[in-house]
Amino acid sequence: MVSVAVLLGLVIAFCFGTSDFLSKGLTGKVGFYRTTVYTLAVSGAFAIGPALLLGIPRQPSYSDGALLALIAVSTFVAFLFMYRGYQKGHLSIVSPTVNSFPIFSVLIAVFVLKVSLSLDVLVALAGVILGILLVSTNVSSLGASKGRGLTPGVPEAVLAAFFFAVTFTSLGYADVTVGYLFPVVAARLGAASVGALAGIALKQNLRPFGGEPFLRLLVMSALEAGGILAFTLALFYASTVAVLPITTTLGGMGVVFTVGLALVFLKERVEPSYSVGVVVLVASVAALLYFTA
């Protein structure tokens, strides 16, 4: 079943990476907050039907409810920071940092789940950290003026990466222990509900929109639904959380699609340190996949 997990992991990377690329145009037109809430809500509507085909879930317990609540909150916060980062910075810079969430996933496994790691995995993690540092710092502006060395959008991207790690770790565990429908609902419709309630409290603009932005939203939501369902199917066929490191790490390879599309269609240009950082990050994430397979 590892081969199935690898294949579905690549599907996750394509879906999430392409959706991230499309989000750049949407956040610029309707704002990052509305993009977050509507993407989660519409993708959730798309994902419910297929999730029902994976079986009838059992009644969740109180502890299951707490886990589902964690999934909803962490998913909303992760998407919010990600879209804010994409709105503020270049996709080719912010995306590699967002998609470095496997490092946090492994750290959670070590310190929370008490999983032991080999030296090979530790070396791969060190490479991921180096890649994050390279893509996160604007080398040419260091020392030019105080406080301007940090690349726009990267602080938000780091926070998004952390919360995505929490989301995928919790989601993978819930898929196996609770069933597949409730976690999917929590990760999309539940997260959208959190965003809507917070938006009302914070007086955010949540008005519906149409035209080209709405069509872009539909495509993004279909891709997001495809990604979350591919993640769910990987665990469904394996029937164990053992494939979680494989699917989450390959999901982090979505940066390849996001950055590639940004370089081709948006003509984004990066400094040599950025390019080196992207290469190191991608190579390190791939190594992490290999050593945890």
Image (spheres, rainbow, N blue to C red):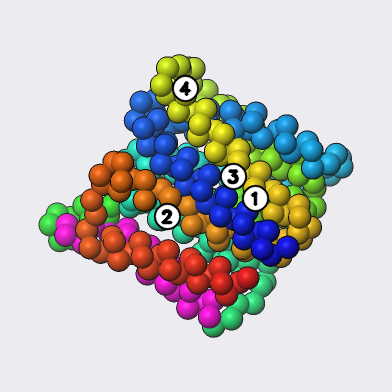
The residue shown at (56%, 72%) is: 290
The amino acid type of the residue labelled 1 equals: Phe
Q: Taking 223 as reference, is 20 left or right?
A: left
Q: From mark 4 to mark 1, how far is it between C-alphas? A: 26 Å
The residue under label 3 is 227
Mark 4 and 1 residues: CB-CB less than 8 Å, in contact? no
The amino acid type of the residue labelled 3 equals: Gly
Q: Earlier in the sequence, mark 2 or mark 3?
A: 3
* Depth check, front residue: 198 or 142: 142
| Res. 231 mark | 1
**Residue 4 in the image, given as x and y percentages of width and height:** 68, 58
Q: Quadrant of the C terminus?
A: bottom right
The residue under label 2 is 256
The amino acid type of the residue labelled 2 equals: Val
* Location of residue 51 by image quarter: top right
Q: Earlier in the sequence, mark 3 or mark 4?
A: 4
